[in-house]
């Protein structure tokens, strides 16, 4: 377990009976026993791109940007502009250097492991029980580059189901909303691009390079190679495949909140109920934000200053603008955090030139996004509030927030604030540090209240928030719960 020096967490795990932790050990054993290998064809393409300077398929340019020449002038304004340009160029070069080092490390590992029949990734847990590969550079939870390079060492015949999932997987790797289509439409998308798929597999760099249009190009190339091999076979369904098919939840944190709160509206927004095609929670929030902004834009700017911001932002509102804020809302993102996230998105688009106006517009957009989120996920908001109150009760006794997960793993809240106390003497000033509990929102399990009451029997916790009437069994009929 990655305890980051958290003594209480280490002690809690040591005190736990081994039998209670058996499900955790079994999960880690399963992950650690999964055999991987390098996809040599994909690695070969990456090596060719890298040798030619990178700069495509998400690879950084191997060349530095040129520093601007100093202007031949004594004009203070022009000199300041030049200095800013030099600073920006040096920052860009520093970032490129860092990215180049990262890629070189990944490729170095891949080349060394290329001729191995297979290798394994031991896993460990973070404090909340999430499993991660212990190798830091090249692993299956890494970037598109890493995922494109790695495949299962032990192949299996595709079968009818596997062939369909391979087509769905390829469609999922594309941007532009393809991954939001129904499964049937995703399969149709892939089948409509068979010529592109064959060309990508046969001539990845000399051909039309269709695979580069994917949001995850190297994974797309790997899928094209595997699918082309299967479709050219006399029996596609018996073709041996080594392809990992990744799946993702529809904002998994909000899925849990909707389930915890039995929230019908929230459940529908995050695919806990059956539907013809997957609901997109980010597009849903963006649509509500746009609705609020259009209403605000019609108001008189003299009495409602945000009317101008609303007018400027109407054309900027989309799922990408709100996605990070919606994702991090389940971890208790603050208004300031949401403002900074949205500000970065607007700055990337060069949507608003003036910095002062950009800041004010970001403030307005953050408030609007959080308002829309609260409206669509009222149950989540009340549960977050309840969790915060419980954390305050525990922190008031100077205790660490702790609980036991459904798998039996004890978890101790690791976040602390170091309290500083200065002691002045005639000879020196001493600084003493002590850990104090910082109230911090946690994403926790359905058995949390019972766990709190067991861990802190003398404390009184607020009653659970009221629940809606969503039937949890409906999730068993949802094809897009994970997709």
Image: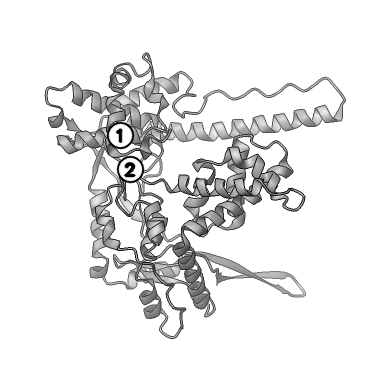
Count neighbours of disc 2 (C-alpha within 10 A) and say few if under 14, some if 14 to 19, many if 20 or more. some
Q: Which mark is residue 185?
A: 1
Q: Where residue 310 sits in the image (x, y, percent)? A: 65, 45
Residue in view at x 26 percent, y 29 percent: 115
Q: Which tag, 1 or 2, sits closer to the chain's start? A: 1
Residue drawn where x is 52% and y is 41% of the image: 318
The quarter holding residue 124 reads: bottom left
Residue 59 x %, y %: 47, 28
Q: Residue at x 75, y 31 (%)?
A: 83
User: In which quadrant is the N terminus drawn?
Assistant: bottom left
Q: Which residue is mark 2?
A: 277
Secondary element under disc 2, as helix, strand or loop, is: loop
**Residue positioned 57% across, 58% down in the render:** 334
Classify residue 417 as left or right of residue 109. Answer: right
Outermost residue toward the right in this view: 74
The quadrant of the picture occupied by the C terminus is top left
Q: Which mark is residue 372?
A: none
Badge 1: few (under 14), some or many (20 or more) residues near its Cα, within 10 Å? some
In-front residue for pair 293/85: 293
Measure how far apart labels 1 and 2 are at the Cα level: 9 Å
- Give the residue furthest to the top: 206
Can residue 340 be spotted in the picture? no
- SS under mark 1: helix
Residue 116 visible to the viewer: yes
Q: Compared with residue 289, is residue 11 higher up or lower down, i.e. above or below?
A: below
In this view, the residue in front, 55 or 303, is 303
Whether label 1 touches label 2, CB < 8 Å: yes
Q: Count up the numbered dots.
A: 2
Residue 376, how many percent across, how many down? 47, 56
On screen, residue 241 above or below 6: above
């Amino acid at each position: 377990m990655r305890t980051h020096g958290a003594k209480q967490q280490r002690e809690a795990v040591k005190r736990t009976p081994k039998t209670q932790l058996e499900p955790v050990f079994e999960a880690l054993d399963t992950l650690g026993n999964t055999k991987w290998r390098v996809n040599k064809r994909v690695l070969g393409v990456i090596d060719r791109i890298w040798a030619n300077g990178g700069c495509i398929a998400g690879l950084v340019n191997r060349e530095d940007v040129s520093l601007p020449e100093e202007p031949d002038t004594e004009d203070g304004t022009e000199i300041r502009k030049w200095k800013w340009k030099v600073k920006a160029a040096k920052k860009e070069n520093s970032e490129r250097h860092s990215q180049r080092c990262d890629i070189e490390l990944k490729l170095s590992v891949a080349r060394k492991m290329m001729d191995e029949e297979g290798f394994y990734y031991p896993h460990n847990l973070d404090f909340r029980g999430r499993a991660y590969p212990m190798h830091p550079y090249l692993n299956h939870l890494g970037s598109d580059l890493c995922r494109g390079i790695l495949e299962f060492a032990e192949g299996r015949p595709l079968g009818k189901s596997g062939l369909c999932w391979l087509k769905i997987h390829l469609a999922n790797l594309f941007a532009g909303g393809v991954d939001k289509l129904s499964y049937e439409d995703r399969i149709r998308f892939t089948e409509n691009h068979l010529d592109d798929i064959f060309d990508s597999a046969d001539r990845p760099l000399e051909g039309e390079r269709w695979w580069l249009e994917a949001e995850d190009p190297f994974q797309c190339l790997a899928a094209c190679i595997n699918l082309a091999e299967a479709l050219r076979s006399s029996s596609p369904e018996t073709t041996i495949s080594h392809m990992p098919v990744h799946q993702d939840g529809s904002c998994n944190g909000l899925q849990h909140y909707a389930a915890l709160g039995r929230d019908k509206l929230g459940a529908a927004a995050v695919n806990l109920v059956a539907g013809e095609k997957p609901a997109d929670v980010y597009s849903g929030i963006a649509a509500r934000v746009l609705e609020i902004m259009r209403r605000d834009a019609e108001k008189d700017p003299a009495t409602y200053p945000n009317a101008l911001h609303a007018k400027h932002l109407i054309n900027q509102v989309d799922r990408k603008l709100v996605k990070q804020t919606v994702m991090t809302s389940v971890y208790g993102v603050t208004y300031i955090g949401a403002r900074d996230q949205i500000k970065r998105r607007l700055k990337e688009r060069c949507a608003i030139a003036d910095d002062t106006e950009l800041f004010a517009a970001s403030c307005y957009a953050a408030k609007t996004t959080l308002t829309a989120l609260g409206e669509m996920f009222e149950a989540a908001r009340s549960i977050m509030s309840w969790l915060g109150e419980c954390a305050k009760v525990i922190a008031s006794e100077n205790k660490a927030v702790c609980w036991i997960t459904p798998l039996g793993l004890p978890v101790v809240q690791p976040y602390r604030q170091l309290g500083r106390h200065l002691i002045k003497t005639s000879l020196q000033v001493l600084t003493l540090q002590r850990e104090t509990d910082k109230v911090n929102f946690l994403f926790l399990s359905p058995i949390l209240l019972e766990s709190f009451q067991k861990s802190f029997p003398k404390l009184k916790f607020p009653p659970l928030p009221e629940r809606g009437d969503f039937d949890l069994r409906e999730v068993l009929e949802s094809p897009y719960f994970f997709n």
